[in-house]
């Protein structure tokens, strides 16, 4: 997986604070492979990685992240942006009913989605009407009726004998769609979902039919449903539908399968349209509002790593990081106050321990992490607070009698003061090394 490969890259990059061209290229290569593995279309991968490379090379050095993490963060941000940024909600019509039309290839999951979407909308207090405008396949209407029944949502279908309007509509999907809309108005449904026909491949006749339905009912949303397993064909299919029906949003179906969802990125990139929903199974409840950030992680197959990076960065107090960076640059001495400040940074990170445990490459630290105890920070704090300001910046002067005084003041045994000073000495050495290499401050106090 990308995580495994990147943790190898992390190893190579450890201790470096700057993004060199070689670092960027090595990491971007792994990203490219991950995207291709996720079935993102080749031209999309090319365009995407070029953008990431450019941004990574221009990126400012971030004290909380190593270079590989920093590039992954950029990749994640770009992916999220392309996938629509924030989750895009359905645009409701000012004058109901809101009309939602579904389009896509046969088997993409439109009719299934119609049921899911209607159930979801009903759950939100809407009163949807399903309209069966797929008259291509003999059982398409029946399938929508079954879904509607399960969802508890009425279905408007061209059943002879139900009304004269129906009779007139039979056979003509455009007329059925229009009659469905009229039915919704008269029965005060506030949302109409129009299911349409699809073919196995894109064809002109199908597209014309869909375009005619669109023109006849002026939908507020046209959702293009695409099977996540479609892979490299996603681009051509999406372009054809975008030209044909100018859809407003994308629904990714069959995300419960093995597909890593590269199609989402391909389609969103070539059309510039947001992905709005995901279908994740055959049951009516297997339906989600699409979250660009989760999809980005899935495409990269990064598991929790991106979340970790995000959390690490948020937790890291920016001023503190800047102060540390300056200290490194100035080659100033690392003091006990700094040591304490860092300990408190770790405390602020809260779930830092858990986070670090999940990081790729953390395996080597696992034992130390397991031994790490937050109460230890309390003891360190008490001890350092019992020192004079001068002792904190010049710990060399802390002789035996000072140690005894500090121990009494902080209510610990002298051996604990000794232990702290020893670990501080190690941390100080580490900081000096980091200063030379310009890397992220480590986790002092955990090496003892
Ligand atoms: P349509 O031709 O676009 O209307 O597609 P359908 O809604 O009829 O779906 C085609 C097939 O895919 C059906 O067997 C559905 O049960 C199945 N299907 C639809 N959505 C999903 C999904 O999200 N996950 C899975 N596993 N199957 C799905
Ligand atoms: Mg269908």
Image (spheres, helix red, strand yellow):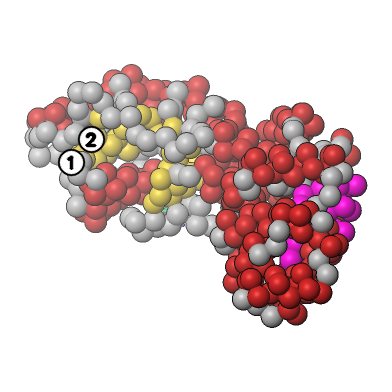
Which residue is at 24% across, 49% downward? 123
Q: Can residue 149 be seen here?
A: yes
Q: Does 162 sit above or below residue 272? A: below
Mark 1 and mark 2: Cα distance apart in space = 6 Å
Are the residues flagged by discs 1 and 2 in contact, CB closer than 8 Å? yes
The x and y percentages for residue 378 are 60, 68
The local crowd at label 1, few if under 14, some if 14 to 19, many if 20 or more residues have their Cα within 10 Å, is many
The tag on residue 191 is: 2
Which residue is more in the foreground, 147 or 164? 147
For the C terminus, the image quarter is bottom right
Residue 435 magenta: yes
Which residue is at 73% across, 75% downward? 404
Left or right side of 402 for 227: left
Left or right side of 302 for 140: left
Q: Which residue is mark 1?
A: 127
The x and y percentages for residue 185 are 14, 29
Which residue is more in the foreground, 350 or 18? 350
The tag on residue 407 is: none
Which range is magenta? Answer: 429-448
The x and y percentages for residue 399 are 83, 70
Compare marks 1 and 2 and give the one earlier in the sequence: 1
Q: Does 351 sit above or below residue 120? A: below
Which residue is at 24% across, 53% downward? 151
Residue 223 magenta: no
Left or right side of 91 for 400: right
């Amino acid at each position: 997986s990308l995580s495994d490969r990147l943790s190898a890259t992390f190893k190579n990059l450890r201790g470096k604070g700057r993004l060199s061209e070689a670092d960027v290229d090595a990491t971007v290569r792994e990203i490219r492979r991950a995207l291709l593995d996720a079935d993102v279309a080749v031209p999309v991968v090319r365009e995407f990685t070029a953008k990431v490379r450019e941004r990574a090379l221009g990126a400012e050095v971030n004290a909380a992240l190593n270079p590989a993490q920093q590039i992954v963060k950029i990749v994640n941000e770009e992916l999220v942006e392309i996938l629509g940024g924030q989750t895009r909600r359905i645009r409701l019509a000012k004058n109901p009913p809101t009309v939602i039309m579904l389009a896509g290839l046969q088997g993409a999951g439109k009719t299934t989605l119609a049921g899911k979407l209607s159930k979801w909308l009903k759950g939100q207090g809407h009163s949807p009407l399903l309209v069966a405008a797929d008259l291509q396949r003999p059982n398409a209407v029946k399938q929508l009726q079954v879904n509607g029944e399960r969802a508890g949502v009425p279905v408007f279908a061209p059943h002879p004998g139900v009304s004269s309007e129906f009779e007139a509509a039979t056979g003509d999907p455009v007329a059925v769609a229009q009659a469905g809309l009229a039915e919704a108005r008269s029965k005060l449904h506030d949302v109409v979902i129009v299911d349409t026909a699809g073919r196995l491949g894109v064809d002109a006749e199908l597209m014309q039919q869909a375009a005619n339905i669109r023109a006849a009912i002026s939908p507020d949303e046209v959702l293009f449903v695409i099977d996540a397993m479609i892979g490299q064909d996603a681009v051509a299919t999406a372009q054809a539908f975008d030209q044909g029906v100018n859809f407003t949003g994308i629904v990714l179906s069959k995300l419960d399968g093995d597909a890593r969802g590269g199609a989402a990125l391909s389609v969103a990139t070539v059309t510039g349209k947001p992905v709005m929903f995901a279908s994740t199974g055959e049951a009516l409840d297997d339906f989600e509002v699409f979250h660009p950030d989760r999809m980005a992680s899935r495409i990269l197959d990064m598991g929790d790593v991106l979340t970790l990076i995000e959390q690490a960065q948020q937790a890291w107090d920016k001023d503190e990081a800047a102060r540390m960076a300056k200290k490194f640059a100035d080659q100033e001495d690392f003091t006990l106050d700094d040591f304490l400040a860092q300990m408190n940074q770790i405390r602020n990170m809260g779930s830092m321990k858990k986070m670090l445990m999940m990081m790729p490459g953390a395996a080597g630290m696992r034992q130390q992490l397991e031994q790490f105890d937050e109460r230890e920070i309390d003891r360190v704090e008490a001890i350092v607070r019992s020192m004079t300001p001068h002792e904190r910046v010049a710990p060399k002067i802390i002789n035996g009698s000072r140690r005894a005084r500090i121990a009494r003041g902080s209510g610990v045994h002298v051996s604990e003061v000794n232990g702290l000073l020893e670990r501080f000495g190690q941390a100080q050495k580490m900081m000096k090394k980091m200063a030379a290499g310009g890397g992220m401050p480590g986790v002092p106090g955990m090496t003892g």
